[in-house]
Amino acid sequence: MALVEYSDSEGEEERAQQSPPPSGPPTKKRKVSTEATDNQLPPLPTSFHDLYSSTVRTSTQDDPSLHAGRKRVTPHVEGNWPTHVYLEWHPQPAEHRILADLLTAESKANPSSTTAANTGINSLLQTDLGVPLPLHVSLSRPLVLKTEQRAPFIDQLRNRVQASGVRTFSAAPHELKWHPNENGSRYFLVLSLQRPENDELTKLLSASNYVAKTFQQPLLYQEDSRSSKGSGAIAKQNARLDEAGKFHISIAWSLDRPASIDGPSGNDCGQRGAAESVTFATLLGGLDIAFAVVKVRIGQDVTTVSLLAARRKALF
């Protein structure tokens, strides 16, 4: 399929001017169909984005000036491979507009910073050139693997995901809130997700944590699960609630503490007024996020682990 389709009517007119008129009866001019030129090019396959899943590394040193003031959480060590397990979401144009509206409303509630390192809220929805970016739900902490561990890690993760029995599913957003990172150097504006119908997020997290533990890597949400009160079945139920409440999608970040992060209780969950809550609830109600694959990024290489196809619902 051609990337750009041109009408050949101009070429015909030029040839007609250069060549002598025919001696026979005049021929009817062919009508150029605009149907082909009106068709848009098909969207790029999702695998195309995996080729450019991360930016080119310009320095092995921690230089915040190269990354809008951000600091590297895990120091770079030669021979170590940064690894991340996650679910990816490519918002459709209508969904992207909803997210942009959410971000605009939040920006109005948080005046721009005047510090030299930061200019306020930084969007994760698109690049500086306006190209939409994929978003993600983390299923692991930032991990670090040795070269010889890369293939075994992927093999084990694929086996655990398949053994979990998780099928393609969707999750709806619950609320929009600010959340600090582990060392408090950045704040993320996140969409927290509701628990899916069959608890798929927790099952995939368990699969990822199992493999991470096998490779002596830190586990995601482990500390919160251990701190859950109770014992036996109650403790397990509390742990699952803790885990499900923290699945989220980041849509923006800030180096400065946002003004809307502190609610009446003084915690880090942005409690909103009644008018704001209605506005955000209306926007969030239009989102239903589908997931069909688990992705593993090791260095700049991305591996896709497909989930089982969803069961067809009976008509009767």
Image: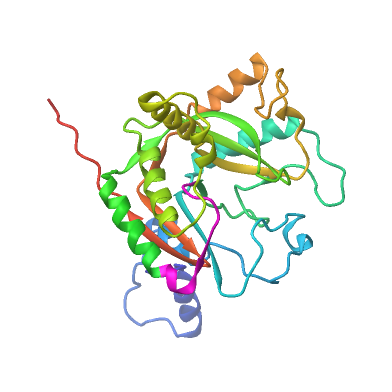
Q: Quadrant of the C terminus?
A: top left
Q: Quadrant of the N terminus?
A: bottom left
Q: Is residue 277 left or right of residue 246?
A: right
Vertical order, 29 against 123 (above or below): below
Asked whether 140 falls inside the magenta stretch, the response is yes
Q: Locate residue 180: give its quadrant.
A: top right
x and y percentages locating residue 24 in the rendered image: 32, 79
Vertical order, 135 against 13 (above or below): above
Residue 41 visible (yes or no): no
x and y percentages locating residue 281 in the rendered image: 55, 23
Q: Is residue 133 left or right of residue 63?
A: left
Asked whether 159 falls inside the magenta stretch, the response is no
The furthest residue to the left: 316
Q: Is residue 64 left or right of residue 241?
A: right
Vertical order, 260 against 146 (above or below): above
Q: Locate residue 254: give its quadrant.
A: top right
Q: Which residue shows up at 48% across the image and 26% down it?
A: 285
Q: Which residue shows up at 64% across the image and 36% down it?
A: 179
Vertical order, 256 against 13 (above or below): above
Q: How many marks?
A: 0
The furthest residue to the top: 274
Q: Which residue shows up at 61% across the image and 19% down it?
A: 277
Front residue of 226 and 291: 226
Tell me the magenta residue range: 138-150
x and y percentages locating residue 100 in the rendered image: 61, 39
The furthest residue to the front: 231
Residue 61 visible (yes or no): yes
x and y percentages locating residue 49 in the rendered image: 48, 61
Front residue of 191 and 236: 236
